[in-house]
Image (spheres, rainbow, N blue to C red):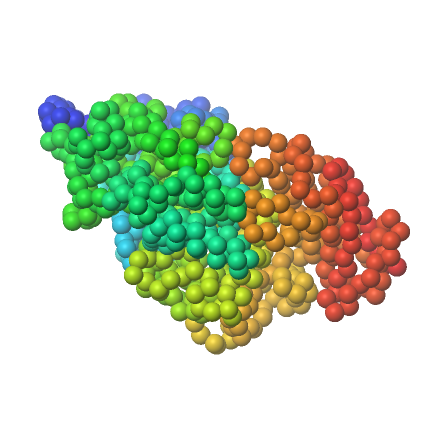
Amino acid sequence: MNVARFVLGVVPALSLFGSPVPALAAARPPVVPTAAPIRHLRDGVEVWSRAGHLKITALTDATLRVRIGRASALGEDASWAVPANMRSRSVAVEPTKRGFRTGSIEVAVDPATLKLELFDLNGQLINADASTIRFDGRSFELRKAMPLGEHYFGMGDKTGVLDRRGYTFVNWNSDTYGFTPSTDPIYKSIPFYIATGGPGGAYGLFLDNTFRSTFDFGHSVADTLRISSVDGPVDYYLIAGPSVRQVVRHYADLTGHAPLAPLWALGYQQSRYSYMSDAEVRQVAATFRADRFPLDVIWLDIDYQDRNRPFTVNKTTFPNMRGLVSDLGETGIKLVPITDLHVAYLPNQNYAPYESGAAGNNFVHDAAGKVYIAPVWPGPSVFPDFTRASTRTWWGSLYKDFIADGFAGFWNDMNEPAVFDTPGHTMPNTNLHRIESDDFAPRTAAHGEIHNVYGMENTRGTYEGMLRLRPGIRPFVMTRASYAGGQRYAATWTGDNSSTWDHLRLSVEQLINLGLSGFSYSGSDVGGFTGGPSPELLTRWFEVAAFTPVFRDHSAKDTPRAEPWVDGPDQLAIRKRYVEERYRLLPYLYALADENARTGDPLMRPVFYDYPDALNGDCDRSLAFTLGRSLLISGPPKPESPEPFDICLPKGGWYDYWTGLPVTQTKLTETPKLDVLPVFVRAGTILPRQPVVQSTSETPRGPLRLDVYPGEDCRGELYLDDGVSVSGPSLRQEVRCSVMPDGVVLDFGPRSGSYHPWWSEISVTVHGWNHAKARLSDGRELSADPRLKSINFLIPDQSGPGRFAIRSN
């Protein structure tokens, strides 16, 4: 705890070695200036009153930082989530009587109560305090008004339902094995929500406070959103839209964009707790290749290690790990091992991670200043103090041998941190961390402040270590726990879910909200981690996961096997078909990944992200989402039931993905079929696809395929690079189409970048073709398929601008 942060309710703190830090003098009443209560700044306002000290600054025309102090001091200007270069940004504002105006919003403050109101420039209310801030010792509570009809999303992978209204959530990273759809808290703390549907459009609020906090979305009081924390700064950001897309993009700018993932991370991935030996891993890999079932990654859980000790290998069961990695790599399969953060407490036993960590004083201490020791998988364990930059550097160095072995990425689990046989299954709040990092002033902090960022800083150490050890190659890190901004370092998954239909539905809602909260690269344990799925559940989960950002099948010890072939050839055939379809879609997926790195737009989105009218539709969209703006997946909301269900399509026109035929209605009634997941393509899409490969290491054979679905704003984008380099040659090209009375014109824009694509030809299919004949602008006559209402033709790769007109005669 930073004893300089607040002057009210100060209690003695302990130094690293247990010596007490002198308490500050007794608190004094805030000094209220006798001049005008609102002080105008170049980039905002500052207000003093007996309610506290308020400072509002405009980082951009649409993003405000709001800080409130109990007295004259606002506390430490530092953040784990918002980089210093973003916090220091500002724009000049236009002063007003009650506040200020930017290029897109207006702020009004009541100087007596510090109540804040935010308006758009048309006078529409975006956000308003429902009452003055409430302080109680070290804790505080903010209250925001909740207009009727406003919906709330985000907060990461919280359980419940997609819309947060009516629920309360606690931010406290927790190991929750076998969590239920109502368990809270779970693994991550992302105190950020998006509101939409109110009179002023969408806005976002991010509370940058790492202590245990609570967000009550009208659960206690129906029209009041209550935001509270047990300690820490009142430091939050208001982000104006007016669209959800704009809020998400501004939030990504604020907390950092996820770096472009390696291409192989978008492939199919197979895991189990655990594959117990070299022989078992080889057998699993061989079965995939024998079945011609695409696979990019096999994951290794803790049993590959020597007695569960991180950064070791069991030489009996895995006698030649480097050889295993190499042999699988020749077949296009990569290995990703788990590397938990608890280091086995083994003094004087030649266990290098402990010996080097102890030598650098790299472990967390207890309240008495001694190294904290507690049980986890290897037995008595110690825990790296990731708030120290030097500790993160040391941690990253531990990957040296694994990088030399050729592992493709790493899995940081148990980093809430999870601790066995302790209250709350984590370390005590009184444990001590040393903050020696970034723009923080060096100080000691209690674990209650660091708990929610501990997992994120763990992944930061891994990510940065991989960059140092393998310069120029994109790191891939998977984490279970994190905080806002953690997308800068790691992908994530939803933790130890269950093999139930409820958890399949929940996974869709969790992944959508993770995407809105910055974590675009996210997935769930396909089939469920605990319990064991029925054949039908596993098949349906495969179908849905084929269209989610991260696609990993994972299951627990002592549960039925969940590899794709376990339920016989009929189920295997369906699962294989959907995995193959994912590989066909890799050019589209990779272009979305590039778009995410540049803009922050999630890969997997709620339908209303690109189609706002869908927010208040009359269809149950429990299993509906979009992949980018162009693909809409609409699974049965009760997938375990044979009952017919309704599908609502946004306005603008759609095509059936599987048949290519136009859909003439906006509301459909479907009967669930186990082998069919309804998928639709937006009219106005040019969808790039490729031939099926067995892994992303394999070069596709044949032409690039462009499926053209004519409609308004018809376009598509190609993006390609080598799939692994941090920087290097790339290829980016936009393709557009326009509809004429007698046909379609296809325009290739100029290509940027020097990367040479794998294709030399492009196969173009135009869907929705209602004419008997067609002629290409180069004079070729084309045959139309009257059954599929399409035409197909082949053209050379277009490395520069080019136009092709397809006419009906």
User: Horizontally, is 318 left or right of 138 in the view?
Assistant: right
User: Horizontally, is 120 left or right of 532 in the view?
Assistant: right
Q: Is residue 148 visible?
A: no
User: Horizontally, is 405 left or right of 345 in the view?
Assistant: right
Residue 471 coordinates in the image, percent (x, y)? 47, 28
Q: Quadrant of the C terminus?
A: bottom right
- Residue at image location 55% in from the left, 57% down from the top: 292
Residue extending farthest bottom? 643
Q: How many marks?
A: 0
- Residue at image location 77% in from the left, 51% down from the top: 794
Residue 537 coordinates in the image, percent (x, y)? 43, 67
- Residue at image location 58% in from the left, 70% down from the top: 668
Q: Quadrant of the N terminus?
A: top left
Q: Is residue 654 visible?
A: yes
447 lies above or below 300: above
Task: Place residue 368 in its image quadrant.
Answer: top left
User: Horizontally, is 728 left or right of 483 in the view?
Assistant: right
Q: Name the residue nearer the viewer: 277 or 658.
A: 277
Task: Place residue 53 in its image quadrant.
Answer: top left
Residue 24 coordinates in the image, percent (x, y)? 14, 24
Q: Name the residue nearer the viewer: 743 or 584.
A: 584
268 lies above or below 409: below
Q: Name the residue nearer the viewer: 287 or 126.
A: 287
Task: Place residue 82 in its image quadrant.
Answer: top left
- Residue at image location 37% in from the left, 32% down from the top: 401
